[in-house]
Amino acid sequence: HCFSKSPIDGYLYCEGVKVQDVMDSAEKRPFYLYSKAQITRNFEAYKEALEGLDSSIIGYAIKANNNLKILQHLRSLGSGAVLVSGNELRLALHAGFDPTKCIFNGNGKTLEDLILAVEHGVFINIDSEFDLHNIVKAARSVGKRVPVLLRINPDVDPQVHSYVATGNKNSKFGIRNEKLDWFLHTIKSYPAELKLVGAHCHLGSTITKVDIFKDAAVLMFHYIDKIRKEGFEIEYLNIGGGLGIDYHHADAILPTPMDLIDTVRELVLSHDLKLIIEPGRSLIANTCCFINRVTGVKTNGAKNFIVVDGSMAELIRPSLYGAYQHIELVSPPAPDAEYAKFDVVGPVCESADFLGKDRELPTPDEGSGLVVHDAGAYCMSMASTYNLKMRPPEYWIDGEDIVKLRHGETFEDYMKFFIGL
Ligand code: LLP
């Protein structure tokens, strides 16, 4: 793992660099710290899994982490991009992603954003009846035929938190198979506007059992056979993203990208299809820690608290989903340190503001470092400015170097939004 405690001095390291040294040289505020090498390793694991499946597309789900430098790095490794807004598309183009490796997803794509997507020739996933009609409008307005995929809800339970389950029958995303005939018939009536090239599904996120992907894939192949019988030349199966990671650091054996691809490999080959995958979390989550400083320690009733300078504003997953992210101190405990169970909380005025609950930790000194692991996905990209906590800076370790990737937002940045001051 890219962040680990040294058996020699007991400090936390990111690759070869002591996190304490990064804290000493970085701005004195919470920040995100990534390992560039781990991003590369994660991407290579997917590339290796896809060997033999020619012309497959790895579409990195930009929503997981939209740092431009990280996007440029993933693009340089050969990644495509999965987009859910016009601005994500603009950013992907800025980062140099090949539009023919980009997929535009979403249940509420606006006509304006669709027009931008059609202009640049990205794949578009059809999500609903109205979405289909808007894509047709965009195609006519730009004067281009659009490569589209149909997003079908296979109704396979991903066994995850309900907020991140997306492929069940009552979901707001995609279409139900009962409506397949209507969609195929309607797509046929727009031959100048729509070219149906594939089928898409996305079950949900944090999935930790490959059988779930397998069950969905079997259904998707069934739908693809049906679509082909209607005379469409389907080229792509897009199985979405959703592979979970080991947030608990408890040595659980979780499926790898290879395990995921193995569930569909033979069927993809035998159906003469190209595969599209849309990983977010499994590419980026474990490459990063969110770094905090301890402000103080307090006790109320039966609860001990470590209060840090980071909060739900910078990292909302624990508050929003009750998500577990592993927490560790940056420096080794003093020999006489007392251990206790702590809630790790921020300064935000909400009791929902916690980064971890009931964590067994040595009592830390004020000013010492405390990290939240696996903070690369859906942490910085979901950060807010609640309580006027400004979005934090981001750094990565590149070889031996500590490199700032993005400035933290400042109070002055905030004040720029007001007119006539
Ligand atoms: N494709 C589609 C259509 C998606 O909706 C998503 C994620 C992905 C791909 C990437 O999924 P991943 O490989 O990252 O699981 N904020 C939540 C996660 C929301 C996921 C939204 N969709 C969290 O922090 O856990």
Image: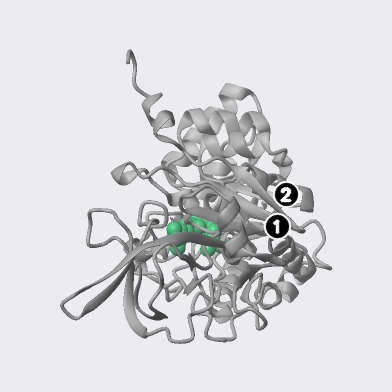
Q: State the SS at label 1.
A: helix
28 sits left or right of 354 in the view: right
Q: Residue furthest left?
A: 301
Percent position (x, y) of residue 303? 23, 77
In the rendered view, tell whether residue 412 sits above or below residue 168: above
Q: Is residue 342 visible in this depiction of the protein?
A: yes
Mark 1 CB lies closer than 8 A to ligand 1: no
Q: Which residue is mark 1?
A: 36
Q: Nearer the viewer, residue 24 or 220?
A: 24
Q: Which of the labelled discs sits on residue 103, or is there none?
A: none
Mark 2 CB lies closer than 8 A to ligand 1: no
Q: Which residue is mark 2?
A: 73
Residue under the point 72% across and 38% down = 96
Residue under the point 42% across and 42% down = 108
The colour mode here is: one colour
Circle 1 residues within 10 Å: few <14, some 14–19, many ≥20: many
Q: Nearer the viewer, mark 1 or mark 2?
A: 1
Percent position (x, y) of residue 245? 55, 73
13 sits left or right of 382 in the view: right
Q: Quadrant of residue 58?
A: bottom right
Q: Quadrant of residue 39?
A: bottom right
Q: CA distance from mark 1 to mark 2?
A: 8 Å
The N terminus, quarter of image: bottom right
Percent position (x, y) of residue 344? 35, 69
Q: Nearer the viewer, residue 66 or 414?
A: 414
Mark 1 and 2 residues: CB-CB less than 8 Å, in contact? Answer: yes
Q: Identify the mark nearer the N-term, 1 or 2.
A: 1
Percent position (x, y) of residue 225? 64, 65
**Please, what is the three-letter code of the amino acid marked with disc 1?**
Lys
